[in-house]
Image: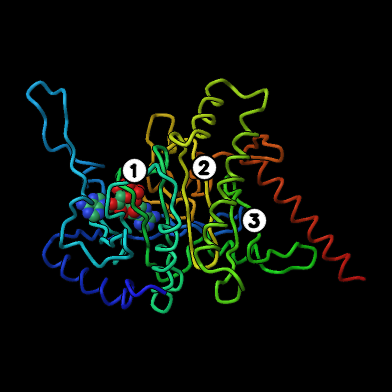
Amino acid sequence: MTTYLNDLYSKLEAAYDAALLSGSLIFTASETQTTTETEYNVKCEVCYAPALALKPKGITPVVESKTHEKIERVNPFLPHDPALFVANASEHHKILLNKFCIVPHHFLIVTKDFHPQTQPLSPEDLLTAWNALQALKNSHPDAIAFYNCGARSGASQPHKHLQILPITRPTPITNLVREVIQRRPGRKETRPGDHFTVPIPCIHHAVLLQDPENTPGKDAEDILVEAYIKLMDSMLMSMREYAEQEHLSEEEKDLVMAGGRASGLAYNWILTREFMMMIPRRQESTNLTKEGITLNINSLGFAGMVLAKTPEELELVKKRGVIEIVAETGFMFGKGGESRSAEEEVQKEKEQEILEKQMGGALSSL
Ligand code: B4P
């Protein structure tokens, strides 16, 4: 294990307290409300943080020429604010506190040099995120790492950065994964290294991670790279199959094909100490109303956690449910790439469940 991340939590605490005191970091208090999404048998979270509506959006224009033709923009990560620096995370990564956090100690793993946020994750990116999760395993065993990659993924900064949310409870998706991989009569066992899906729309590509301590011949980097490539392959394959459907509109085809090109690919990536998942994105935001109230969704949306900044957003999310609004921003792939509606997806899961129960019954009566 790398020594870069020794005492990570103490370093985070010290930097966080100092940055908060000096005003370099803005913590926004929020209220978390839980939704029970009975259709999917999962409880999701809506984090309500009205003060965030006042936060500046994305990269800030700083210089505008007299003719207004050229706008130069600042990159907040290069150079970074020294008050937000926590430690180096590897030879090529640094840890910065998230300037606008709603969870204390939320931090970013940022490349020291500029790399675009549209780039795939490198083996070193993957290992650094993994090492950070391992470094927090005693204080925050359920911390989650994520990467918003590409234009429709919910990213607001173009400099490559992964994020770690050091939460103190399992995310809704972690709870669901633990439930899904449990061994049950009649259900195929999910073993470390296996690809699996979760019974909510749009999450089709997930891998249960092998434990590097108990996997002879492979280290953590091998396991992470293997899982990442497996997910990327299966995600691109699903997109290709989806695009080949005859009934698809030209507009939808264009959208999927743009995603199939490296430059146009947008996806969310989630890593915990147990699993990795990848979710391709068709659009950045979800339409909460026909009148045009939209909500941006990032990786955390697929972890079952969305952020509402106004009372209207909060009410609309609670009314429609987190899963339904988040699913609108991804693709619903079926077998052979057919698309399925959210209702069809639920119906299929129900049929699967009944089949599993019947098989379980049959097995136990043997
Ligand atoms: P991105 O990948 O580009 O975008 P994001 O996390 O979706 O955050 P966004 O900036 O769009 O903010 P939003 O209002 O949706 O990440 C860029 C990161 O850099 C962000 O974390 C940003 O705060 C941070 N940042 C910007 N300027 C910075 C600077 N000068 N120095 C250091 N860091 C800087 O969300 C607001 C915040 O809430 C984000 O941190 C977001 O990650 C977090 N959040 C969203 N949903 C959440 C949820 N359900 N639960 C907990 N936190 C949530």
Tag of residue 116: 1
What residue is shown at x 35% (from left), y 43% (from top)?
312
Residue at mark 1 to residue at mark 3: CA–CA distance: 28 Å
Residue at mark 3 to residue at mark 2: CA–CA distance: 16 Å
Front-most of 134 and 101? Answer: 134
Q: Are marks 2 and 1 in contact (CB under 8 Å)?
A: no
What residue is shown at x 25% (from left), y 61% (from top)?
97
The amino acid marked with disc number 1 is Pro
Tag of residue 362: none
The amino acid marked with disc number 2 is Pro
Tag of residue 195: 3
**In the image, is residue 277 above or below residue 274?**
above
Label 3: which secondary element: strand
Q: Are marks 3 and 2 in contact (CB under 8 Å)?
A: no
Q: Residue furthest right?
A: 366
Label 1: which secondary element: loop
Label 2: which secondary element: strand
Mark 1, other Cα within 10 Å: few <14 / some 14–19 / many ≥20: some
